Structures are given as structure tokens and as C-alpha cells.
């Protein structure tokens, strides 16, 4: 069964590629401000209020490069996964700026190359836009200095590889001070659960100016795909800068304590070939997408769209990361939301469970940054673990990987009204 499982995306809206932009760190800092406002725009001699960006309609063009890559038609792959009640087939390659690199067949031409000049420092903005996989990324012969995650400054630290979960961003400084040569930059998934994934290595090339394209690049030493200890020690190094100018305003007093289990169950599915399908759940509830938008139902007071009783704790406590549960794997279906008081402080502990298998899960809150105050392997212990929380300079981010067979505690102030929730199974 484990082999048939891989990660399924439930409410993920990520685009499917790993990409980064870069510029020499010495270059003038470019600042963009996007003001979203309703403004009167006129067409055909009629003015009407419309959402504008910086007063412009349409807004500025944003250029992105895409292409994670499946050999088959991605619509067919999704349709087939739905029919089988299983996750879609794994991809055939990850890509860097849309290109898989020369370790893949017919890919010589499809290789992203970054030319660098000796002794300059480069800022690489690395974004994991892969659908499901947490990725290790390294550059042969070069260390990276991590300075920012999810657009928040960190205490700088130097590392030979980074770990980045879907939806996360990491900015690193790289000094082009090595022997002029061609060096591979490489990305490969981190997977420490017995699940089958696209585990091949995507590459791009860091090339010193003047070095011919014929020189064969050196490969970096990426951590092994199952290197849990590298992953844990890397994440432990991430700390907010917490300077007077960029303070970490960690909520010290918690108004609301939430504890959510993350699991993968099996539900009946009359339209599926096997009669069953895999179902992701939080606190054993599988979200059912309503026909009417949640905010629409809220503002127009439309009854019956959602219930306000999403539980603050799992309905039935159990040994979450003990022996795999392989029986009674059904989940409860529902469109249930948790209402949180404006400006209250929330602590949310996310607990992976061994329903079928343990697995890592990126978790995201729309519209929020949060502080990752603690994480651990095994079951969260509400008596002992909070004493170890970092409430001084924890990493502040908007997406966090809940470790395989472990837990993560986040804190935030609920000061941006709306609806937010996103976990990627
Ligand atoms: C937009 O145009 C309408 C109709 O002309 C007018 O009533 C309204 O005040 C205008 N709104 C703004 C924000 O200018
Ligand atoms: C998915 O993978 C299976 C097994 O490799 C293969 O038989 C099937 O054709 C693939 N589906 C699509 C849509 O490519
Ligand atoms: C990278 O960092 C490691 C450990 O901090 C150090 O041993 C190594 O020499 C560094 N490599 C380069 C190329 O700077
Ligand atoms: C990569 O995945 C394939 C297919 O699941 C598997 O056969 C292979 O052993 C994996 N390789 C590594 C290094 O994990
Ligand atoms: C990691 O995988 C390698 C094979 O790729 C295996 O030899 C090793 O035992 C695994 N380590 C752990 C901790 O599972
Ligand atoms: C079919 O469903 C049963 C449980 O109902 C499960 O044990 C089995 O693995 C499923 N097969 C596939 C291919 O999903
Ligand atoms: C939970 O399961 C683990 C692994 O099987 C076991 O070591 C631990 O003692 C169990 N905890 C409790 C409270 O039963
Ligand atoms: C989840 O809900 C289903 C349906 O109500 C129930 O059968 C199952 O025991 C519950 N599982 C857990 C782990 O609470
Ligand atoms: C939110 O709470 C903080 C701390 O109590 C307070 O300083 C702030 O003024 C509150 N903000 C609003 C908008 O009520």
C-alpha cells in the first residue's frame, strides 16, 4: 500500500515549478509596491469602479517561468488519479527555471545557466514551486548564506545545502570566489517516509565568465533523500533577525489553543474504479468544497454553506505517531470552519499522524505570517514541549513543513480578517 501512496494535493494552489531569480547583491535594491484599490476606470465612455493595481487596470505584468514537467498530459494525469481514487502519477522531472538540466534525456539544450563574475556576490531568490516535494538545493563548490525566508530577514548562516518546502522562498548570498569553472546547482526531494516520489535530480549551471560551455560541471553533494537529521538541523538554524528595526513580535500570551492532526484516510467513492479514494483530513475532517464561496456565504448571510464547529482538538485522541492505523480509516466529510476572534493570538500545533503512513506536510496560512515556535518528532507533549519553545527569535514565515511523524507549533495574531487555510498533503 505504501508504494501506491504519494503525496496528494488537496487545497493547493501552487504552480508547478522550481524557479529563482537572481541579481548581483551589489546592484541597487529594487522596491516594488503594489497598492490594490478600487478605482473608477473608463472604457467605451463609461466609468465604473474596478480593482486596480497602483491605479492601473489591467495591473502590471508579472513575468514567471514555468514547466515542471510531466511527459503525459497533466489533465489526463489528474483525471486518471481521480478515477483511481489515488494521487496523480509522479512527475517525470523537477525543473529549475523551467528546465530539467542535462542529467535527463534530450535535455542538453534545456539547461538553465547563470553566468557569474569572479569575486562578485550574488543573491539567489529560490522558490519551491513544485507541487508536493520538499527539496534540497545545493551548488557544487559553493556555500550559501541564508539571509531571508518567506520575505522575512533571518540571522544569516552559512550552509552547503538548503531545504525548501512547496510554497516557501529562501534568499541566499553566494560568493563567486572559487576557481573559475562550471558548477552544477542541483535540486532533489527530501523524503523520509516510505513513499514513492519523483526522486531524480534537476540541475542548472553556475558558470564563471569566460569558461567555455564544453567544460563538464561538477555535481554538489546533496544530502541523501532520507537525511532527516540534515533536515532537522537545517530548520533549527532558521531564526528571525529580530533586530530593533526588524523585530520578531512573537505573541507571548495565547488567547486560543488549537491542536490539529493531519491524516490520510480512505473514503468510499462510488465513481472511483476501486470504490474508494484517499482522503486528506485535519482533525479527521475532510474539507468539502462548497458550491458557494465561504466569504460570499458569510457576507450575504447564506445559511447552510458551512458550519462553525471545526473542532479545536482531534475528536478522538490516539497514539498519533505510533503503529500505522490500517483499519477504520474513514474520515468525516464537512465544510466546517473555525471562527477566530479579531486580533486574538492563536497557537496552532500541527500533528502528523500514522494513518496509513507518516509523511511530511507543508502547511500554509493565507494572508498571514506566523512564528514557528517549536517542532519535534513523535507526539506533541502539551506538558513538556512548550517549555522548549523559542519565543525570542523563531523563524517567521507563511509556509512550514510539518515533519514526517512529528509536529510543528506556530503562533500568530489574527489581525487580517478573511478566510485562510491551506495544507498540502
Ligand atoms: C466613480 O464614478 C461614480 C459614477 O460616476 C461616482 O459616483 C463615484 O463617486 C466614483 N468613485 C470614485 C472612487 O471616484
Ligand atoms: C501513470 O502511470 C502508470 C504506471 O506507470 C501508467 O500506466 C499510466 O499510463 C500513467 N498515466 C498517465 C496519464 O500517463
Ligand atoms: C563551506 O562551509 C563549510 C563548513 O562551514 C566549510 O568547511 C567549507 O570550507 C566551506 N566551503 C567553501 C567553498 O567555502
Ligand atoms: C527513486 O525512486 C525509484 C522509484 O520509486 C526507486 O526505484 C529508487 O530506488 C529511488 N532511488 C533512490 C535513490 O531513492
Ligand atoms: C537512507 O537510504 C539509504 C539508501 O538510499 C539507506 O542505505 C539508509 O539506510 C537510509 N537511512 C535511513 C535512516 O533510513
Ligand atoms: C482498494 O481499496 C482497498 C480498501 O478499500 C485498499 O486496501 C486497496 O489498496 C485499494 N487499491 C488501490 C489500487 O487503491
Ligand atoms: C506510541 O507508539 C510508539 C511507537 O509504537 C510507542 O513507542 C509509544 O510508547 C506509544 N505511546 C503511548 C502513549 O502508547
Ligand atoms: C474519523 O471519522 C470516521 C467517521 O466518523 C470514524 O469512523 C473514524 O473512526 C474517525 N477516525 C479518527 C482517527 O478519529
Ligand atoms: C491588537 O492587540 C494588540 C495587543 O493587545 C494591541 O496593541 C492592538 O492595538 C490591537 N489592535 C487592534 C486593531 O485592536
Image (cartoon, grey):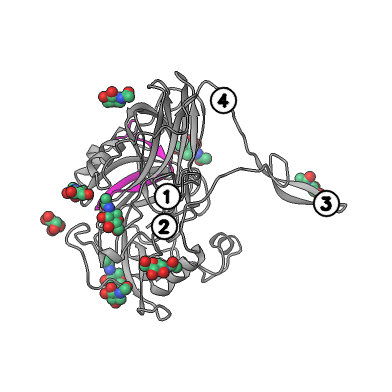
Q: Is residue 412 visible?
A: yes
**Which quarter of the figure is the N terminus placed in?**
bottom left
Magenta residue check for 129: no
Q: Are marks 2 and 3 in contact (CB under 8 Å)?
A: no
Residue 91: mark: 2
In depth, the one of 232 and 162 nearer the eye is 162
- Residue 267 in the figure: left or right of residue 1: right
For marks 2 and 3, give the one nearer the viewer.
2
Residue depicted at 17% across the width and 61% down the height: 323
- Residue 133 in the figure: left or right of residue 70: left
Q: Are marks 1 and 2 in contact (CB under 8 Å)?
A: yes
What residue is pinned by disc 1? 94
Q: Are marks 2 and 4 in contact (CB under 8 Å)?
A: no
For marks 2 and 4, give the one nearer the viewer.
2
What residue is pinned by disc 3? 43
Q: Quadrant of residue 219?
A: top left
Amino acid at each position: 500500500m505504501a508504494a501506491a501512496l504519494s503525496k496528494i494535493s488537496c487545497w493547493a494552489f501552487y504552480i508547478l515549478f522550481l524557479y529563482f531569480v537572481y541579481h548581483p547583491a551589489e546592484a541597487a535594491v529594487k522596491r516594488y509596491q503594489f497598492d490594490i484599490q478600487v478605482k473608477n476606470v473608463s472604457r467605451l465612455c463609461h466609468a465604473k469602479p474596478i480593482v486596480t493595481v497602483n491605479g492601473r487596470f489591467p495591473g502590471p505584468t508579472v513575468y514567471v517561468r514555468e514547466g515542471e514537467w510531466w511527459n503525459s498530459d497533466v489533465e489526463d494525469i489528474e483525471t486518471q488519479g481521480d478515477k483511481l481514487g489515488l494521487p496523480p502519477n509522479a512527475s517525470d522531472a523537477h525543473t529549475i527555471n523551467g528546465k530539467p538540466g542535462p542529467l535527463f534525456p534530450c535535455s542538453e539544450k534545456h539547461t538553465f545557466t547563470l553566468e557569474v563574475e569572479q569575486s562578485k556576490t550574488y543573491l539567489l531568490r529560490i522558490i519551491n514551486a513544485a507541487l508536493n516535494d520538499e527539496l534540497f538545493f545545493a551548488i557544487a563548490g559553493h556555500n550559501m548564506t541564508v539571509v531571508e525566508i518567506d520575505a522575512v530577514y533571518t540571522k544569516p548562516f552559512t550552509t552547503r545545502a538548503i531545504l525548501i518546502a512547496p510554497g516557501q522562498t529562501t534568499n541566499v548570498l553566494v560568493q563567486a570566489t572559487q576557481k573559475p569553472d562550471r558548477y552544477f546547482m542541483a535540486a532533489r526531494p527530501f523524503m523520509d517516509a516510505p513513499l514513492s516520489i519523483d526522486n531524480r535530480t534537476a540541475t542548472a549551471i553556475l558558470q564563471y565568465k569566460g569558461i567555455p560551455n564544453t567544460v563538464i560541471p561538477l555535481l554538489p553533494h546533496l544530502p541523501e533523500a532520507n537525511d532527516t537529521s540534515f533536515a532537522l538541523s537545517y530548520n533549527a538554524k532558521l531564526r528571525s533577525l529580530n533586530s530593533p528595526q526588524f523585530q520578531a513580535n512573537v505573541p507571548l500570551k495565547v488567547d486560543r489553543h488549537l491542536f490539529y492532526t493531519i491524516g490520510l484516510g480512505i473514503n468510499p467513492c462510488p465513481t472511483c474504479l476501486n470504490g474508494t479514494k484517499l482522503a486528506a483530513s485535519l482533525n479527521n475532517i475532510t474539507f468539502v468544497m462548497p458550491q458557494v464561496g465561504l466569504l460570499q456565504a458569510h457576507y450575504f448571510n447564506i445559511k447552510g454553506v458551512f458550519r462553525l464547529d471545526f473542532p479545536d482538538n482531534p475528536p478522538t485522541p490516539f497514539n498519533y505517531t505510533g503503529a500505522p492505523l490500517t483499519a477504520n480509516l474513514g474520515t468525516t466529510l464537512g465544510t466546517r470552519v473555525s471562527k477566530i476572534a479579531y486580533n486574538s493570538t492563536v497557537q496552532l500545533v500541527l500533528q502528523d499522524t500514522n494513518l496509513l503512513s507518516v509523511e511530511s506536510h507543508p502547511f500554509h496560512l493565507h494572508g498571514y505570517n506566523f512564528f514557528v515556535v517549536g517542532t519535534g518528532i513523535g507526539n506533541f507533549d502539551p506538558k513538556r514541549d512548550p517549555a522548549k519553545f523559542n519565543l525570542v527569535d523563531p523563524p517567521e514565515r507563511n509556509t512550514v513543513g510539518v515533519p514526517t511523524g512529528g509536529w510543528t507549533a506556530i503562533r500568530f495574531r489574527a489581525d487580517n480578517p478573511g478566510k485562510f487555510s491551506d495544507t498540502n498533503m
